[in-house]
Structures are given as structure tokens and as C-alpha cells.
Image (spheres, rainbow, N blue to C red):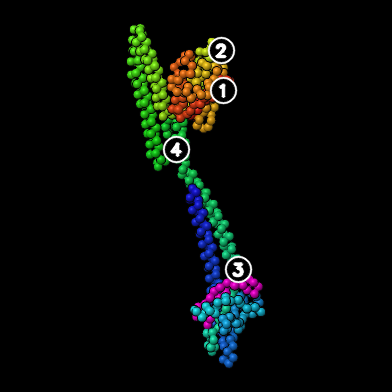
Amino acid sequence: MLLALGWSLAALVIVAVVLAFLFQQAAIRRVDQGLHELIDNLVRYSTVDATTQDVFAPPLTDERALAAYSGRYWEIAEPTADGQVRPIVRSYSLFDAVLKTPPDLVAHFKAAPGKSVAYDTRGPLNEPLRARAQQNWLPGRPTPVIFLAAEDRTAVDRDVRGFVVATAVAFLLLGGGLIAAIVVQVRVGLRPLFELRREVASVRRGKAERLAHAYPVELIPLAEELNALVAHNQEVVERQRTHVGNLAHALKTPISVMLTEAGQRPGPLAEVVSRQAETMRQQVDHHLRRARAAARAQGQGERTSVAEILDELARTLERIFRDKGMEIDWDAADDLYFLGERQDLLEIAGNAMENACKWGRARVRVRAEPTGEERLRLTIEDDGPGLPEEGREAVLRRGARLDESAPGSGLGLSILHELARAYGGDLKLDTSLLGGLRLEVVLPRAEA
């Protein structure tokens, strides 16, 4: 649009300047033609006295040259030895003035005999004049004579200015119309692309499953390819989920058999097998969760209400930690949505809130808020003992436990961290205003 506007405006300016120049040249040519005719009349009807060699002009050359300072002037002169021009006879309109000539006029006639000269000068009243000079030989006179004619060009200049103003107004209107037409053409022409962009964004944000808008014939192949790409991605995600499920069944069954057999045959070896098999199962669960989250994050076609998940988790955890009298204070807008599957948000928020309830004394505070059009922040705080700064990085490593006396496998915060990263988010640990640990998770946000 900018290129078209710039080129159109530049073309209009160039054309306007060229038209003004051509109009001015045409007007000046008309004046020059009248001056040429006046000089022809002077040359044709001027006479020379055979005795004195004085030059006599015809009695009537132009009626306008009979009134003083009328703007129509003529003069008959002769070149002097020093290269100047000396008037011989002049029109009544010049009164007591003479026509000004270029300083190199005589030299020009010597270099190019018979060639007339047109030039601009000032008149008796300092008005702008268009003048013409021509050197000729008259019968009976041994030296040449210079014929001069001039006309006031004020009217010509006024006509040129009027033409320039009219042309400028017309071209401004034309330019405004062209600009409006270009803007409308581009906006209307690109409207299907804007619609395509909005629909693709809706698919990415989980508000639609495929492109369903009716597009022009030029965009139909693109829309079909995008729908095919979406379908292919969904197929890949489903295939990954199937592989993850198959792997879960393939690994969990042998581990369960090992645990069952070890439990039926007590002894030192059975204890070692049971302990290692249980570790294997935890590791398998951890990696299966991570694989499922990665597969679902690739699709990103589902959205989950944050408020519903937090309400469900708060009621469940308050019942589980009823003995501690745990109170969970949560807050989230009804139109705040997580761009991902419900199970993943349950696991992320559930791990964080369960960890806060486990270490908190009596109170847990949960806040969910948008941090932009595409991100939301989930903050969980507790009033427990907190976590020293040097231990915050270590606790996010898989299997790390700072308190071996507490129940658990050390996988909770690690799973939460890796689930958040699988969705392109992040997890941070800090000190809570309640005195305990503050856990902050950044996740993708879906439009309401």
C-alpha cells in the first residue's frame, strides 16, 4: 500500500510539474510569435533616406504601441563600434525609455547572422517583458539594423499561475481519490487473508478445530493445506499417545509381576527387588507423564477453565488434609483458560497445591491471573517452613528430596517443572508473604 501510494503521489507531482512547464512554454511561444510578426512588419515596411541614410519606421505597426507604457514596445537600433546598441527610432509607447538588451547581443549577431534572439527583461515601469531581437540589412543602408520588439508578460505569468493552481487542485483531488481507491482496494483485497489469519489463530488457541470459512478461489488451496496440516498434527499426537499407552502397558505389567513375586518370597533379595522395582515404576510413571504432556502440547487444541480446576482441587485437598485444618484460599477469573488438556492442568496445579498443603501449617493461597494475551501465571503460597534459597534449584531435579523423613518420592516438583516446560512455560520458587514457599508457574493461556 505504501509503495503504491508513494508511486502514485510521485507520478502525480511529476505530471503536474510537466504540465505547468508545457503550458508556460506554449504561452511564451504565442508571445514570441506575436513579437516575430511585429519585427517582420518593421523589416518589411521600414525605409531608408538615400541622402542621410536615416531609418524611418512605418506609420502604423501596432495600435497598442501608440499609447505610452502600454506594454507593447518596438525599437529600431544599430550596433556601435564598442559592441553596444544605439536606438535610432522607437515606438510611442516607450516614451522616454529604451529597450534593454543583453550585453552580448551584438556579439551574438556577429557569430550567427540572421538568427533572432528571445530573452526576458524589464520594461519602463519595471514590468516583466518578453523581448525579441533580430538583425537585418535594409536597402540603401551599408550598416545592419537591429529590430527589437517586446511585450508585457504579466498576463502570461498570471495565466500560468492560474493554470498551476487549477492543476494543483485537480491533482490533489485526483491524488485523494487514488489514495482512497488504493486503501479500499488493498483492504478489500486482503480481507480474506485477514480472516484466514484470525481463523488460524482460533485453531491454534483451541477455539476451533479446523478452517471452515468460505475463501476466494485463490486461497482455497492454502486453506485446504492448512486443514491437512492440522489433521496431520492431530494424527501425530494421537499416534504418540497410542505409543505412550502401549509402552505403559508393556513396562507396568513386568514390574507388577516382579513386585508380586518379591512379595510372595520374603528375604533380602526380595527386599532389594521390591525396592528397585518400585523405583522403576516411579520412573516409568514420571517419563510417561512427560511424554503424554509433550504429545498434548504439540496439539494445543484444547482449553481448560482454570477456575474449575482450582475449585475442584481445593475441595479435594481440604478433605485430604482435614486433620491439619488446612484452609485453601484460591482466586481465578471465570474467563481465564489454560491452553492445554484438563489432565495436565490437574497434574500441574495438583502437585503444586498438594506440596503446599503437605508443608504448610494451616493456610495455602492460590492465585491465577493473565500476564498477557498468550500467558497466565499460577501462584501457590503456603505458611510452612519455606525453602532455603540454596535448595530451590536442587528440589526441581528429579528424585531430589531435602527432607528424607517426609513421605514421597521426590518427583512432585520435578514433574511439575517438566510439565510446565513441555507447554513452553516455566516454574520459579521464592519466599512467600505468608512465611513459607511461593511457587510461580507460567503456562500458555487460551482466549475466552
Q: Residue 325 carries which label?
A: 2
Which amino acid type corresponds to the residue marked 3 in the rendered image? Ala
Q: Is residue 281 rendered to the left or right of residue 149?
A: left
Residue 194 image offset from top left, x and y in percent = 47, 39
Query: Quick one: SS at disc 1?
Result: loop
Magenta segment boundaries in residue numbering: 113-136
In the rendered image, which quarter is residue 62 located in?
bottom right
Q: Of discs 2 and 1, which sits in the foreground?
A: 1
Which amino acid type corresponds to the residue marked 2 in the rendered image? Gly
Q: Name the residue under label 3.
A: 155
- Which tag, 2 or 1, sits closer to the chain's start? 2
**What main secondary structure does the magenta stretch of the protein show?**
strand
- Which tag, 2 or 4, sits closer to the chain's start? 4
Q: Residues within 10 Å of mark 2 (few under 14, many from 20)?
A: few
What's the residue at 57%, 57% (across, down)? 169
Q: Of discs 1 and 4, which sits in the foreground?
A: 1
Residue 422 image offset from top left, x and y in percent = 43, 27
Q: Residues within 10 Å of mark 1 (few under 14, many from 20)?
A: some
Residue 262 image offset from top left, x and y in percent = 35, 10
Q: Mark 4 points at which residue?
A: 196
Which amino acid type corresponds to the residue marked 4 in the rendered image? Leu
Query: Quick one: SS at disc 3?
Result: helix
Q: Of discs 3 and 2, which sits in the foreground?
A: 2
Answer above or below: position of 69 versus 322: below
